[in-house]
Amino acid sequence: MEKYNLVIVGGGPAGLAAAISAYDKGERNMIILEREPKLGGILNQCIHNGFGLHTFNEELTGPEYAQRYIDEVKKRNIKYLLNTTVINVSDKKEIKALSEDGLLNIEAKAIILSCGCRERPRGGINIAGARCAGIYSAGTAQKLVNIEGYMPGKEVVILGSGDIGLIMARRMIFEGAKVKAVVELMPYSSGLNRNIVQCLNDFNIPLMFSHTVVDIKGKKRVESVVIAEVDERLNPKMETCQEIKCDTLLLSVGLLPENELARGASVDLSRITRGAIVDDQLMTSIPGIFECGNVLHVHDLVDYVSEEAKEAGEKAYEYIYSSKDESYEKTLIKTENGVRYTVPELIIKNDDYNPLTLKLRVGNVYKKVKLEVSCDGDVIYSRMRPVVAPGEMEKIDLKSEQVEKLRKATEIKVYLRSQE
Ligand SMILES: Cc1cc2nc3c(=O)[nH]c(=O)nc-3n(C[C@H](O)[C@H](O)[C@H](O)COP(=O)(O)OP(=O)(O)OC[C@H]3O[C@@H](n4cnc5c(N)ncnc54)[C@H](O)[C@@H]3O)c2cc1C
């Protein structure tokens, strides 16, 4: 059994930033375990630019952004193992991993889970039709084009207008394919507005809201897809069906946090984010197990992943060296009126009054609203938002005096108030 103070599972942007911050706090006895042959996570296949505007004030590609953190990890001589898949984490903080040298058994004082997320597959949304070739998740297509050098197809329809679908629409055009339409079930996009403008509008790719794919036709390979408009209950209106000839269907229908390890360790998971329920130390329900990045909740920008992970590294370090009793009393943040969730979801009672950021997503597009936080009925934070949308993560930065109220409250609510 190998022993480390801190084990970080996943060497993507979250794992790298967490390792750097734990090191900078003083931790030397730690390791990053990464299943891929390279550090950097999903960023390695995101060769488009647009990363790092907040962190570096520059527009970097995904690999460039990742490299800045990889360089920092190497500069500090932080230990990492590649081609090493963690297969189990226990609530006692024992880790089993498969590496090139066989099975590793590791014991840790603290663990940071930063395993990212995966794409929802076709089976997750039950599209009827042929099970022929030519149906890919958008991320798989991205890997084929950007890393393996293969073209998934020539005439493409994309289902889902999340960021990966939007980015891939433009990418396929760059590679010479024709993108016939991006079809979106909801009346709004779950992707960033800037991606709709830069990836669809600039290339005249139609974005069809409130539509879905109801059939896939083809024998060996996709020959066409049938799309239909949906009603307000998202049921297809079959009289609106239209057939689009294509040889490829890309699915960009949601990301799911990879929480199998957390589940195995009996960590409490949120039914909304599908990530762990964490307190404001980013600690899960199992003391000493932390989560950050896309495994905790799907972020829109990698800069926010790095920010959150930096905090996780610091908190894990403090946990390892603190003699605090772990049985904190915590207050659950209730979300109402359009707010789907917050991270953290739990606030430790009567802890320090350091500034704190709550991250959240809303469930629909709302215009002219106030984003508010109340403690025992008193509004402690209120900010006007001309528009909020599910695709964009909202942040609430609370100052010390507001955090003091939060820590003393017995009821905390985060909600939208209409201004119309
Ligand atoms: C296609 C796509 C396009 C994007 N475009 C942009 C953009 O333009 N701008 C932007 O700011 N953000 C963008 N993002 C978001 C950004 O890439 C993510 O926010 C960020 O990569 C999340 O970091 P992470 O470390 O949490 O997860 P990941 O990057 O997914 O890293 C997780 C790592 O954990 C490893 N891992 C998982 N399970 C295990 C295990 N059991 N054992 C060992 N290792 C494990 C994985 O191999 C992976 O390397 C995009 C994301 C995608 C998918």
Image (cartoon, helix red, strand yellow):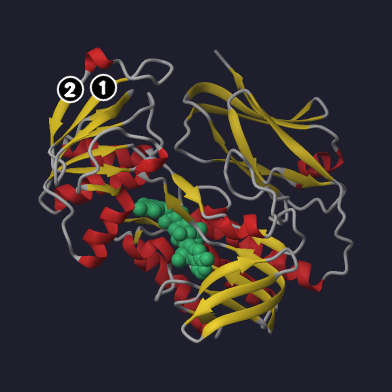
Question: What residue did someone put label 2 on?
Answer: 242
Residue 76 is situated, as x and y percent measured from the top left of the image, at: 56, 83
Position above or below: 232 against 62: above
Residue 160 is situated, as x and y percent measured from the top left of the image, at: 33, 37
**Labels in figure, total:** 2
Instruction: Please state if 113 lies on the left or on the right of 299 as rendered.
Output: right
**Towards the viewer: 265 or 139:** 265
Disc 2 is placed on an element classified as: strand
Q: Which mark is residue 228?
A: 1
Position above or below: 54 against 23: above
| Label 1 close to label 2 by CB (< 8 Å) | yes
Q: Amino acid at mark 2?
A: Gln
Q: Amino acid at mark 1?
A: Ala
Q: Residue drawn 63% across and 65% down?
A: 112
Query: Crowding near pointer 1: few (<14 within 10 Å), some, many (20+)?
Result: many
Quadrant of image for the C terminus: top right
Residue 352 is situated, as x and y percent measured from the top left of the image, at: 83, 54
Real-space CA distance between mark 1 and mark 2, rounded to the nearest whole angstrom = 6 Å
Q: Which mark is residue 167?
A: none
